[in-house]
Image (spheres, rainbow, N blue to C red):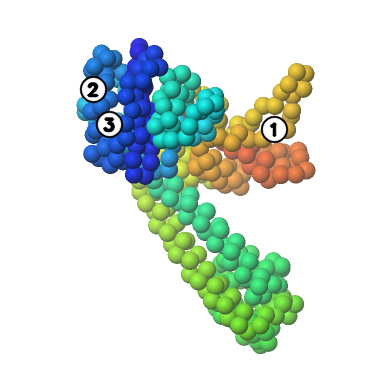
Amino acid sequence: MNPLFVGIDVGSRNNAVYIMLPDGSKHSSFSVQNNLGGAQTLSKRVVAALTEKNLPAAVIGMEATSVYGNNLLCFLREDGALGRFERKLHVLNPKQVKKFKDAYSDLPKNDLIDAFVIADNLRFGRITAPVYMDDYRYKALQNLTRARFFAVQNLTREKQRFMNYLFMKCSGLTQEKIFSDNFGATALALFEEFETPDDMANMDIDQLASFIAHKGKNRSPRPLEIAKALQAAARGSYRLPKTVTDSVNQVLALSISSMRAMQSQIKALDKEIQRQFDNIPNTLTSVPGIGPVFSAGIIAEIGDINRFNGQAALAKFAGLAWSQHQSGMFEAHNTRLIRSGNRFLKYYLCEAAHSLVRCDTEYKRYYDLKFKEVNKYQHKRALALTARKLVRLVFRLLKDNRLYKPA
């Protein structure tokens, strides 16, 4: 088959297009707006080139550029004019395109040149499989699970920022493990109620214990012990000038408000994810510890499991594969995870593995074994290896469409 190669350099406003003939020679290059009219023009030009040269197929590729290429990708897949020809759509990793361009030592940097590099990369053929877009249910679910990923990342950053300012307000509260969760309802109510360490240290101990019991809805078994620990931490904390204290309290109040809003967003996303996930039959939720949210995150990124040749291909797609460092008779035993891979799938696999360690004895034993093998990066290494083990289970369950049975 001699296809037409179309490279598209996607931008927020315009798309640069380079159409290359099967022998590598140029057919045409042009620029169109990144909107519906521009996409229609692009389609007409590609169809005209296919008709003119009597070619049966087109291989179309673009560099992954945030969300700017998603709409164009959907249009090219659904376009009826292009549907008369065989077509393959590729989304190339920017790193792959850059490395390929490095082989050309004298190329300038502009959008049309970048489109040429993408088209030539397609012509060489050593690229990944066409982008998966067979079922839009996965894309709809993916929008939600990725939004949750970013919401969790934002919440984590906000919590770290909060703890930094809490150290300024009352350093002892961050140095001692007084609450099981510094972001629980009782802890946050305490941080909001008392403006300075002196207010906490000078309060009657029974009143402070009563406050803790009330805010904790009488769930704490030892409010008096917590009150004593709080006052001890307050007495040992730094004192700030009032002007500085007022600004710190204001920042902490805003941070608490932000965290509550983010937690509310995550709950709303979890609810919608579960609703969307009900439309996709799967067997992952049969694994103890992997609920609908983690299962949805994994399924949304994988799509149809049949597009992977084996569990090793799935692991590499998730970024849970290790690079090789070998020369002559030497081969390194300690290597790093590959830098490429789907970071969203990697995140949900690692989160699911972490949950599975708490619920499944086999995975707990495996995690503990890997944790004890080294003296540094113990948790990070053990979790990555456990997630890699989970990949084999995920692949088998989805491939065979069977329920999980613990060993």
Q: Circle 3 sits on which residue? A: 42
Look at label 2 and name its amino acid.
Ala
In the image, residue 305 above or below residue 189: above
Residue lying furthest top in this view? 1
Of 302 and 80, nearer the camera is 80
Of 4 and 365, nearer the camera is 4
Q: Residues within 10 Å of mark 3 (few under 14, many from 20)?
A: many
The residue at 72%/38% (across/down) is 369
Q: Would you say residue 220 is visible in this rendering?
A: yes
The residue at 29%/40% (across/down) is 33
Describe the element under mark 2 as helix, strand or loop.
Answer: helix
Q: Circle 1 sits on which residue? A: 335
**Is 216 on the left or on the right of 45, as rendered?**
right
From the image, which quarter does the C terminus lie in? top right
* Marks 3 and 1, how far apart at CA: 45 Å
| Disc on the earlier residue, 3 or 2 | 3
* Marks 3 and 2, how far apart at CA: 10 Å
Look at label 3 and name its amino acid.
Leu
Disc number lying in front (3 or 1): 3
Look at label 1 and name its amino acid.
Thr
From the image, which quarter does the N terminus lie in? top left
Image quarter of residue 170: bottom right
| Disc on the earlier residue, 3 or 1 | 3
The residue at 72%/76% (across/down) is 237
Which numbered dot is residue 48? Answer: 2
